[in-house]
Amino acid sequence: MFSHRRNRFVGPIRVSVVVALALVSLSSLAIAAVGVGPRVGVSSDPDQIFGGIHWNYGEITRNVQLRPSVELGLGDDVFSLAANADVAYEFTTSGRWKPYLGGAVSLFYYKFDVPFRVNRDDDDISAGLSLVGGARTQRSNGGEFLIDLKLGLTNRTPDFKAAVGWTF
């Protein structure tokens, strides 16, 4: 799934760039968000459990919402960090659950647990696209609960992700 080059300085530079971008994004995202909350889930290829935080910006246009997130994943001998920009169309229904469908652009950092003396890098940065679907409902305290599914459309994204989240 991943190609690797050998350069001992590339790894620390990549990590620094990803951390800097994440910090800048987090600070600007938090300012305009109408809701924020935790999310947890599982993914396939890499097979991981993950947790993170998401923001809800409400409607950016009629029935279209921007919901970025940042996630940390563990498992399958890989540590992952993902920054996701999800855009979803929410279908109008008369029921309590509001289904949505959309897409995501993601930036991934992968840190591999490779055996000693293997001639390859032990980290990778890549971007990818996913199809997003799910449903959300209002909680009695004014927040929301969501179920989120993603199908990877590029070979640099997890094949499948399932998450639950809460927004306050």
Image: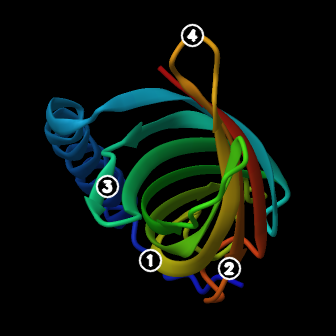
Distance from the alpha carbon under mark 3 to that under mark 1: 25 Å
Q: Residues within 10 Å of mark 4 (few under 14, many from 20)?
A: few
Q: Earlier in the sequence, mark 2 or mark 4?
A: 4
Report the disc number at residue 141.
4
Q: Which residue is mark 1?
A: 127
Q: Nearer the viewer, residue 75 or 51?
A: 51
Q: Earlier in the sequence, mark 1 or mark 2?
A: 1
Q: Closer to the observer: label 1 or label 2?
A: 2
Residue found 60% across the figure and 86% down from its top: 3
Q: Could you say whether the residue bearing mark 1 is in a helix, strand or loop?
A: strand
Q: Are marks 3 and 4 in contact (CB under 8 Å)?
A: no
**Residue 75 visible to an observer of this rendering:** no
**Residue 72 visible to an observer of this rendering:** yes
Q: Which quarter of the rendering shows the N terminus?
A: bottom right
Report the disc number at residue 73.
none
Q: Which residue is mark 3?
A: 59
Q: Are marks 3 and 1 in contact (CB under 8 Å)?
A: no
Q: Earlier in the sequence, mark 2 or mark 3?
A: 3
Q: Could you say whether the residue bearing mark 3 is in a helix, strand or loop?
A: strand
Residue found 41% across the figure and 64% down from its top: 63
Q: How many marks?
A: 4
- State left or right for residue 47 relative to residue 124: right
